[in-house]
Image (cartoon, coloured by chain):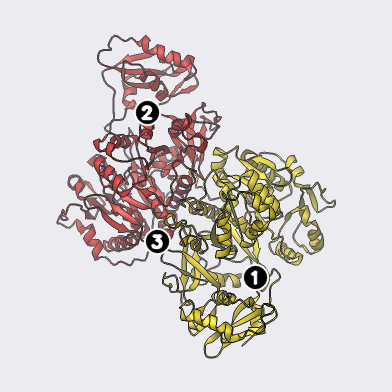
Chain colours: A red, B yellow
């Protein structure tokens, strides 16, 4: 016998989980709520306007010949227009490709071709890039200009016109039909230190479920970091980057006031926080640092600003600085492959203001509803939840990419054993908080243990003579791998010896902070560390420099 | 061309929306949280215990021979055991039948047979009922006794034993396999004033989506009526009635402390609010009235108690009384067919404490995320959102019953035109709040307009001589229908004339409160009004008494 599938009355509406369904409640309850585009004269639309503009955009794209299954690429800064594309493009059954404008022109061309983009909506700021790669684009047929500065659309057969002009010409009533909730809604590319960018993709169903679960996870917080209907939302992770962490969908479903800041300029961001009373944002540590360091920051009240920090680890020092300015920072965790949010580091009420407060905010977080998150050893056995035992973080959730676009080999690796492998290493404590300690490719497997390169680096970085530090694993016949520390000394400290530094790590091992296997045998003094084009440490190159 | 369905890597986990998935986040983050059974010595379990007890219950039910597709019926008061059944029964792929213990023994027998119940878990309080109907039950094979008072399980081949004893014997590790998310998880019966009880049914997918959307709808409230992780939940709508409005699933997913009060006894309820610090409940107006009227109520602080009121309309007077005791009451709307929640009447922050405050709490509410809710005329055209124009409330949501069990004719009527017909009449105001004004079967269609019988009744009820009032529509050749008022006068007011009463209604019509068509031509003085077995006005019988 098997479970009964429910009987469906022929006329009953089965309710596919489509992105258009996120609009029902906010259009019914918040039609006059505002969406602000914060550059120049601050353009303001209402949700009722958004509804009409989505329908106009739907018709405009249909008039360009787009059909379900086609791909519409967007190159824009964060704007109300991008929000309109977040809805109208997938609502047509098309795929929205959010192009990472920080990639090199060659990489952008590669991703547009690989995603088979048919139409490109392009901000005039990126026309020079487009001009450079136009000849290489094999699938693109038409472009639409997005302009804030009155740039006219370039003449020629490739350009259909300017966004606002075309919108004004399009009919304000568009029927968005139902289709399979497993239809692809979005795609974008993730870049590592090696190889070509890899495409991930998300269905309507996945985006709707991510929206619901993130809303529940954020809104259920008792006090710290909670989201509610009186919040004013402004993204500070770009909309091309994992749909700005999916928060524009959350904000729209909840009917929040939304503020889009265009290109990230500290003075603009600070002005908008001040004048539009922004209360909820999210960003990477670098952007938070940039905003806090801007001269104008001292004149703006930041004490009503809640902020999810992700992308890379927030240090306790940055969290402390933000807290001193009154910003309610806390960590969110995820990656391109996971739509992205998996966990949030809300502080329990009893811990607020205690010594544990900041320590909890910089944890990687506790899983959202529906997220099954494990730390496992190489045989997929669970590590104990003791806050110490580390293993790879593997997850299941209803919104994880089901593979890499047209890349079965990498897809198989991602999903080996039926769990998505994050390639992050971490531990879970008794309260359920995950702490990611390293990337699996940077972790050092030695003497049967996994040693975090980041933890050793943190210890060595405390030495007053050390300017920069990287720890890598090099092959070792006896131990598998052994840690090697590459140290850049501060000017004037050239007399320091390897033993001085090793002592610091030995002391930490004696205190039980790290495993004894983590004490590097070799400490190399170098002039500089290999970095990637965006300034991250490039351990792949370092490992090539020190093969054994 | 059609939309691209996403490619699935063979090993990728597709993540069916199954009830078991609601447990992931709370088991990871709140294993020590409490679940209290509030009778006698207040039994306490943790979520970790719940997890083990669900697994034991799964094994116990398998050992009784149950297989996916079988039906397990439960007759119990609100308890931790019922919560365990909410999870373990559907997690096995079985169907949970929540039996309405307030039905007559004949109706209970009918519903058990109609649902094809295989096993019954029965509280010792209902053994007399079971004894009475046992011979009529055509599909039931085994029973399990649930006892709070040490009653031994009756001997004989029908009883497998007592719940706690069988649980203790069962293995604490149970594998709950995946299956289709559209598998039926629950079923129960709804009774009207006519005909046999009708079965509704919900799939795993529907219950998961209801849980997520209700959580989002409740938790996003800025201040009034919001749910969060520090809340303490106690149901006061029975668990057999539309899964206690689905809130036990919400509370469990969110990891809240939960309190189950057994049979509803005012002193027990008040004691639990006091000692367990209950902060969130839901009930029908009658239960709220019962609790407020209990002598013990004056000694208990109710000012931290949030309360959704549904089932029938909350009067402003009851809302005011509750507010004076500090209870945060507000309306929730739905019905058995809708899983149930469709809308909630949260008060916007700007209205809190103003004259509008109580008026908003007694509105029917604003739609939850994903709910498409319309008021329509007979041709399915939308009524204007002006707070006056009334039409039938029709809805779409991902959690509506897809029909009545084994009843295609009624199912077709429920879903005519692809929208679920609530049979409620109401209006929507410019802020998006629905106000249900009548049941469609009780509304009076006269002169091309729909007149609410409830509104005319409210006006006539203000006359000091009127003890009871019912207004019905009777057939009329010229107008379609005409309203007739049936009035029971208070003792000593027999001299009152029909004209005295009609004057009151005419004045209301002159003021524009109701349509002129709503003024009854006929006002009949009667000794008593026809009522149903549960004391509701029985307008069907009245219409038979006054056919024209």
Q: Residues within 10 Å of mark 2 (few under 14, many from 20)?
A: few
Residue A317: which numbered mark, if any?
Answer: 2
Q: Residues within 10 Å of mark 3 (few under 14, many from 20)?
A: many
Q: Nearer the viewer, mark 2 or mark 3?
A: 2
Q: Residue at x 72, y 64 (%)?
A: B103
Image quadrant holding the C terminus of chain A, namely top left
Element carrying mark 2: helix
Name the chain letter of the residue that bears numbered label 3. A
Q: Do the numbered discs 2 and 1 sit on residues whose CB atoms are within 8 Å?
A: no
Q: Are marks 2 and 3 on the same chain?
A: yes
Q: CA distance from mark 2 to mark 1?
A: 64 Å
Q: Residue at x 48, y 60 (%)?
A: B357
Residue on which disc 3 sits = A27
Query: Of callouts 2 and 3, which one flags the residue occurring earlier in the amino acid sequence?
Result: 3
Of A299 and B148, nearer the camera is: A299
Q: CA distance from mark 2 to mark 3?
A: 42 Å
Residue B244 at x, y percent in the picture: 62, 56
B174 versus B494 height, above or below = above
Residue on which disc 1 sits = B192
Image quadrant holding the N terminus of chain A, namely bottom right
Residue A164 at x, y percent in the picture: 23, 59
Q: Do the numbered discs 2 and 3 sit on residues whose CB atoms are within 8 Å?
A: no
Q: Nearer the viewer, mark 2 or mark 1?
A: 2
B258 versus B109 height, above or below = above
Residue A542 in sight here: yes
Q: Quadrant of residue A288?
A: top left
């Amino acid at each position: 016998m098997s479970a009964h599938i429910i009987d469906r009355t022929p006329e009953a509406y089965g309710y596919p989980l489509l992105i258009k369904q996120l609009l029902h409640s906010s259009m019914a309850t918040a039609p006059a709520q505002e969406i602000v585009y914060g550059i120049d004269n601050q353009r303001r639309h209402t949700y009722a306007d958004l509804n009409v503009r989505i329908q106009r955009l739907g018709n405009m794209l249909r008039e360009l010949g787009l059909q379900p299954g086609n791909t519409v690429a967007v190159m824009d800064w964060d704007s109300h227009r991008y929000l309109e594309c977040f809805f109208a493009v997938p609502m047509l059954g098309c795929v929205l490709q959010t192009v990472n404008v920080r990639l090199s022109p060659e990489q952008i061309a590669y991703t547009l071709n690989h995603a088979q983009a048919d139409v490109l909506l392009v901000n005039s700021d990126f026309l020079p890039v487009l001009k450079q790669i136009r000849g290489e684009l094999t699938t693109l047929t038409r472009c639409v200009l997005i302009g804030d500065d009155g740039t006219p659309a370039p003449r020629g057969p490739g350009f259909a016109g300017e966004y606002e002009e075309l919108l004004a010409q399009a009919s304000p009533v568009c029927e968005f039909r139902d289709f399979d909730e497993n239809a692809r809604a979005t795609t974008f590319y993730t870049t590592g230190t090696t190889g070509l960018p890899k495409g991930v993709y998300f269905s309507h169903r996945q985006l709707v479920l991510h929206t619901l679960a993130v809303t529940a996870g954020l809104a259920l917080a008792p006090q710290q970091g909670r989201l509610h209907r009186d919040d004013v939302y402004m993204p500070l992770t770009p909309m091309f980057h994992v749909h700005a962490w999916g928060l524009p969908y959350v904000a729209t479903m909840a009917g929040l006031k939304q503020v889009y800041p265009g290109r990230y300029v500290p003075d603009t961001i600070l002005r908008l926080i001040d004048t539009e009373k922004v209360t909820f944002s999210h960003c990477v540590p670098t952007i938070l640092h940039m905003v806090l360091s801007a001269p104008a920051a001292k004149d703006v009240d930041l004490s009503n600003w809640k902020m999810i920090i992700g992308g890379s680890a927030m240090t306790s020092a940055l969290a402390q600085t933000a807290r001193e300015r009154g910003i309610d920072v806390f960590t969110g965790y995820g990656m391109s492959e996971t739509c992205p949010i998996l966990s949030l580091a809300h502080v329990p009420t009893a811990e607020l203001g205690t010594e544990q407060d900041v320590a909890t905010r910089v944890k990687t977080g506790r899983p959202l509803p529906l997220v099954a998150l494990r730390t496992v050893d190489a045989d997929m056995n669970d590590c104990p939840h003791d806050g110490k035992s580390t293993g790879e973080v593997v997850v299941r959730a209803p919104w994880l990419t089901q593979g890499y676009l047209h890349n079965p080999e990498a897809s198989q690796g991602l999903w080996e054993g039926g769990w998505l492998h994050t390639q992050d290493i971490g531990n879970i404590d008794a309260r359920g908080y995950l702490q990611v300690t390293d990337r699996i490719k940077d972790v050092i497997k030695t003497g049967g243990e996994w040693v975090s390169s980041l933890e050793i680096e943190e210890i060595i970085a405390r030495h007053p003579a050390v300017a920069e530090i990287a720890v890598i694993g090099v092959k070792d016949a006896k131990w598998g791998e052994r840690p090697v520390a590459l140290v850049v000394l501060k000017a004037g400290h050239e007399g320091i010896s390897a033993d001085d530094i090793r002592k610091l790590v030995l002391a930490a091992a004696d205190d039980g902070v790290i495993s004894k296997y983590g004490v590097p045998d070799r400490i190399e003094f170098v002039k500089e560390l290999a970095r990637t084009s965006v300034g991250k440490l490039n351990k792949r190159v370092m490992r090539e420099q020190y093969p054994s």
